[in-house]
Structures are given as structure tokens and as C-alpha cells.
């Protein structure tokens, strides 16, 4: 799209299009990336008996399971975010528009890793709670019933993700309007983003503890005979 716009009469609009598409792909990676990056309990649950032999606590196993997909998703999103900011800053207008774009990019970069952790904790918790519904490999259930189960779980995971965002969104909105009233919008974005990231980090930590507890109580022999 960028190369085609370079040869068009409105060639000056191509940074805006590339920046917009980069932002869209970053949002897409946030919402759908955890469903694609399944290198966690959703893939390793059949090897739970081996995982339990590791001299690690449950939360450490859970962190190791979700850390790789979280890092990969964060890296991809940061690259897309940097590209969107680079394309967006020259198009900003006004005295503080450029700084506001940079602040928005920095704030999103701080929040995205925590969002990725939470979006990965939710499906992994569902796997440990309902392992029979997440069978992988050749023995995985097929047909319209299995599709219906996956659809129900996808909707449930999305609702859980929205609920997890409510506390962080409330803190972010309150601090944003307070700091904006006292200083500038760019500083308000940064302060509100850091506060939201801290709230999300607390939720992600509690989620990891929950995953560790679920994994420790997971009975491999019972699930295999069920």
C-alpha cells in the first residue's frame, strides 16, 4: 500500500496510511495474538506429568509457560507501535501534538506487556480448569459440538479480559483528568499509563499465582482416566 501511494498524486498521505495500518495490526495482535501463540499449557498439558517433575513452584512453571508468547507478542507490538509513532509524529499539528503522539506511544508501550500477560493468563486458567475441553493432537474433539465449545470459551475469555481491564481503566481515567487539569495532556497520558500498567501488573501477578495453584492441584492420573 505504501509503495502504491508513493506513485499516486497524493503521495504525502502514505505515512498516515502506514501508521494507521500499523496501529490496526498492533490491536489485532493484542486481541488475536494470544489465540495464535499457544506455546503454553494449551500445548504442553499432555506433558503435565513431566512438568510436575521440575524442581520449581507452580507459579514458576506458569510463568515459564506464558513468558515466551508474551515476549514475542510484545516485541511485535512494539515494532508496530514504533512504526505508527514515526509515521504519526510528522503529521501532528499544534504546539503539543507531536509530544502527545510520543506520549501516547510510550504509554501504550508500557501497558501492552501487562495486557499480553493477562490475555495469556485467562486461556491458560481455562485450560487448567477444564482440561477435557482443550485436548490437543489427534485425539482432539472435532465437529460442531467442539466448535460450539470453543466459541463459548472464546466469548467467556473475552468477557473475562474486559472485566480485568475495568480497575486499570478506572485508575487511568481518574489520574489522566487530574494530571491534565494540573499540567499538560502529554504528561497526563504518561502518568495514567504507568498507573494502569501497575494495576495490570498486580492483576497479572495474582493471575500467575492462580495458575500456579491450579497447576499444583492438577491431577494428571485423574485427567487421563477421565
Image (spheres, helix red, strand yellow):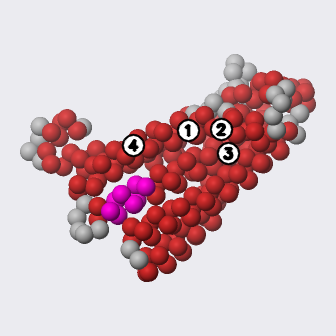
Badge 1 or badge 2: first in the primary sequence: 2
The residue where tag 4 is placed is: 80
- Structural distance between the alpha carbons of marks 4 and 3: 23 Å
The residue where tag 2 is placed is: 66
For discs 3 and 2, the disc positioned in front in the rendered view: 2
The numbered mark at residue 196 is none
Query: Could you tell me if the residues under marks 4 and 3 are in contact, i.e. CB atoms within 8 Å?
Result: no
- Structural distance between the alpha carbons of marks 3 and 2: 7 Å
Any magenta on residue 213? no
75 or 121: nearer the eye? 75
Question: Is residue 18 rendered to the left or right of residue 150?
Answer: left
Q: Residues within 10 Å of mark 1 (few under 14, many from 20)?
A: some
Residue 13 seen in the figure = yes
Magenta residues, start to end: 99-106
Badge 1 or badge 3: first in the primary sequence: 1
Badge 3 or badge 2: first in the primary sequence: 2
Tell me where residue 103 appears, x and y as whole percent. 39, 60
Q: Residues within 10 Å of mark 2 (few under 14, many from 20)?
A: many
For discs 1 and 3, the disc positioned in front in the rendered view: 1
Q: Residues within 10 Å of mark 3 (few under 14, many from 20)?
A: many
Query: Could you tell me if the residues under marks 1 and 3 are in contact, i.e. CB atoms within 8 Å?
Result: no
Tell me where residue 203 appears, x and y as whole percent. 68, 56
The numbered mark at residue 71 is 1
Chief secondary structure of the magenta portion:
helix
- Structural distance between the alpha carbons of marks 2 and 4: 21 Å
Amino acid at each position: 500500500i505504501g509503495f502504491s501511494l508513493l506513485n499516486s498524486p497524493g503521495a504525502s498521505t502514505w505515512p498516515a496510511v502506514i501508521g494507521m495500518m500499523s496501529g490496526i495490526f498492533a490491536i489485532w495482535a493484542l486481541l488475536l495474538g494470544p489465540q495464535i501463540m499457544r506455546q503454553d499449557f494449551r500445548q504442553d498439558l499432555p506433558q503435565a506429568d513431566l512438568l510436575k517433575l521440575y524442581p520449581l513452584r507452580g507459579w514458576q512453571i506458569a510463568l515459564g509457560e506464558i513468558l515466551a508468547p508474551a515476549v514475542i507478542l510484545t516485541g511485535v507490538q512494539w515494532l508496530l507501535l514504533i512504526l505508527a509513532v514515526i509515521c504519526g509524529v510528522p503529521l501532528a499539528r499544534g504546539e503539543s501534538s507531536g509530544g502527545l503522539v510520543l506520549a501516547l506511544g510510550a504509554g501504550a508501550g508500557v501497558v501492552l506487556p501487562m495486557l499480553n500477560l493477562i490475555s495469556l493468563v485467562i486461556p491458560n486458567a481455562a485450560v487448567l480448569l477444564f482440561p477435557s475441553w482443550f485436548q490437543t493432537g489427534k485425539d482432539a474433539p472435532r465437529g460442531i459440538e467442539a466448535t460450539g465449545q470453543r466459541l463459548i470459551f472464546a466469548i467467556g475469555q473475552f468477557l473475562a479480559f474486559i472485566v480485568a481491564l475495568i480497575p486499570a481503566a478506572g485508575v487511568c481515567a481518574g489520574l489522566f483528568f487530574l494530571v491534565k487539569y494540573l499540567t499538560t495532556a502529554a504528561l497526563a497520558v504518561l502518568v495514567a499509563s504507568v498507573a494502569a500498567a501497575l494495576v495490570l501488573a498486580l492483576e497479572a501477578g495474582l493471575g500467575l499465582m492462580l495458575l500456579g495453584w491450579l497447576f499444583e492441584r492438577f491431577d494428571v492420573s485423574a485427567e487421563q482416566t477421565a
